Every structure is written in C-alpha cells, then in structure tokens.
Image (spheres, helix red, strand yellow):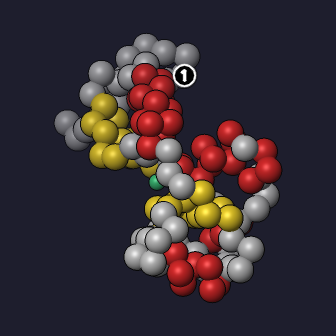
Amino acid sequence: MSRKIVHVDMDAFYAAIEQRDDPRLRGRPVAVGGSGPRAVVATASYEARAFGIRSAMPMARARLLCPDLVVVPPRFETYRAESRRIRAILRRWSSLVEPLSLDEAYLDVTEPLPGPMPAL
Ligand SMILES: [Mg+2]
C-alpha cells in the first residue's frame, strides 16, 4: 500500500512572526536577517518579495532592490517556540511527524489519528 505523506511548509515564517508581533511591520517590506556587510536575507515578507527579494540573497542587494526595506534581526528563540507549538498541532493528526527545519515538516497520514478533521 502506498503511504500518504503531507509536506507542510510555512511560508515567510520568520517574517510572518515579526509582522504578527509588531503591527508597525504589517503591510511593509520586511527582511529578517543580519545587517553586516556579508549578511543575507533569511526570510522576506510577501511585500518584500514583490521587489524581487528572496531568501539567501545578500542583504546589500535586497536594500538596493527596495530602499524602504525594513531589516529585522532574527529572534530564533521565538521562531523555535512557534515551531514547537505548530508541531504540537501537527501531532494531533499524525504520530509520524518528521521536522525538516523550523518551518517545514513531513506528516505520514496513511493512518491518521482521529481528530477534528479527517486527513484525506
Ligand atoms: Mg518555508
């Protein structure tokens, strides 16, 4: 029998958390990352992506593409805590949750746990 695997990938995870926690960042182009000469973009908000800014891009290039870019230093403790909360939710649907990173996981839903919604 083939197995049913769900891939969960939270989009713009770090930037979304920053915009959630600081209303001034909402609707603005945000890049999470360092600000030194060799810094790169860890995550870009949707507003920043509209300027062509992507993860792993040098921050200096991102600032050229979008002069109004708001650069926010990462808060990995907060991202880890949110990741743990989300994994706890995912484990309501599957006993086999394999995290790939803070914002990505595989769920084996071949035999889903009984929950509020069936996994199809
Ligand atoms: Mg992601």
Q: Is residue 12 visible?
A: no
Q: For the N terminus, which image quadrant?
A: top left
> Helix, strand, or loop for circle 1?
loop
- Horizontal relation, residue 85 to residue 23: left or right: left
Does the Cβ of the disc 1 residue fall within 8 Å of ligand 1?
A: no
Q: Quadrant of residue 113?
A: top left
Q: Is residue 34 visible?
A: yes
In the image, is residue 91 above or below residue 63?
A: above
The front one of 69 and 100 is 69
In the image, is residue 30 above or below residue 4?
A: below
Badge 1: residue crowd in 10 Å (few <14, some 14–19, many ≥20): few
Residue that protrudes farthest toward the front in the picture: 36
Q: Position of residue 23 (x, y in %)?
A: 78, 45
Q: Going 50% across and 61% down the picture, which residue do you hit? A: 33
* Dot 1 amino acid type: Met
Q: Position of residue 77 (x, y in %)?
A: 44, 36
Q: Position of residue 25 (x, y in %)?
A: 74, 53
Q: Position of residue 59 (x, y in %)?
A: 52, 75
Q: Going 34% across and 35% down the picture, which residue do you hit? A: 107
Q: Going 39% across and 43% down the picture, which residue do you hit? A: 102
In the image, is residue 66 above or below residue 9?
A: below
Figure disc tally: 1
In the image, is residue 105 above or below residue 120?
A: below
What residue is shown with label 1? 117
Residue that protrudes farthest toward the left in the picture: 1
Q: Going 55% across and 16% down the picture, which residue do you hit? A: 116
